[in-house]
Image (cartoon, grey):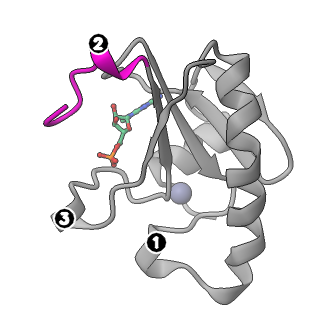
Amino acid sequence: MSQCLFCRIVNRKIPADIVYEDQQMLVFKDIAPKAPVHLLAIPKKHIENLDQLQAEDASILGEMLGKFAQIAKDNGLDQGYRVITNTGPGGGQEVYHLHFHIIGDIRQASWRGM
Ligand code: 5GP
Ligand code: ZN
């Protein structure tokens, strides 16, 4: 089993402020939020990033994305939100376990370049 940072959060080896969980996905608050609402949605399966996606991962991703709207609403983002996934060094990826940033209230954000 992978011992990457986000796998350790999945396995409850290190704490996180979890806002949603199901069989395939975990959603928790970013430890250094760049906006008033800044969530990270990850597959429980260790996939490094979009570059490492396998054909069999398509259904996991489809199910994850399909749940973002409700998760955003449940976290107060009724005016919309931004979804970002950084891929590789050129994309500024720091944690090599696929994750989608779900960011809301973007006008108050300090995300790189925002
Ligand atoms: P990346 O740059 O890889 O797209 O984003 C990694 C994100 O993970 C960053 O926004 C960073 O603040 C967040 N992060 C790093 N370590 C932890 C941690 O231990 N717990 C939580 N909740 N977020 C983390
Ligand atoms: Zn992992």
**Magenta residues (range):** 105-114
Left or right of residue 55: residue 5: left
- Which label's residue is closer to the chain start, 1 or 2? 1
> Residue 14 sits in which quadrant?
top right
Kind of residue sitting beneath label 1:
Leu
Tell me if 107 is positioned left or right of 72 in this view: left
Cα separation between marks 2 and 3: 26 Å
Q: Residues within 10 Å of mark 3 (few under 14, many from 20)?
A: few
How far separated are the C-alphas under marks 1 and 3? 13 Å
Mark 3 belongs to which amino acid?
Pro
Out of 57 and 69, give the one closest to the viewer.
Answer: 69
User: Relative to the observer, which residue lies in front, 2 or 30?
Assistant: 30
Residue 12 located left or right of residue 105: right
Q: Quadrant of ligand 1?
A: top left
- Which sits earlier in the primary sequence, circle 2 or circle 3? 3
Residue 7, percent from left and from top: 58, 50
Label 3 sits on residue? 89
Q: Position of residue 97 (x, y in %)?
A: 47, 57
Residue shown at 46% from the left, 72% from the top:
50
Residue 19 visible from this viewpoint:
yes
Residue found at x 79% / y 54%: 24
- Kind of residue indicated by mark 2: Gln
Image quarter of the C terminus: top left
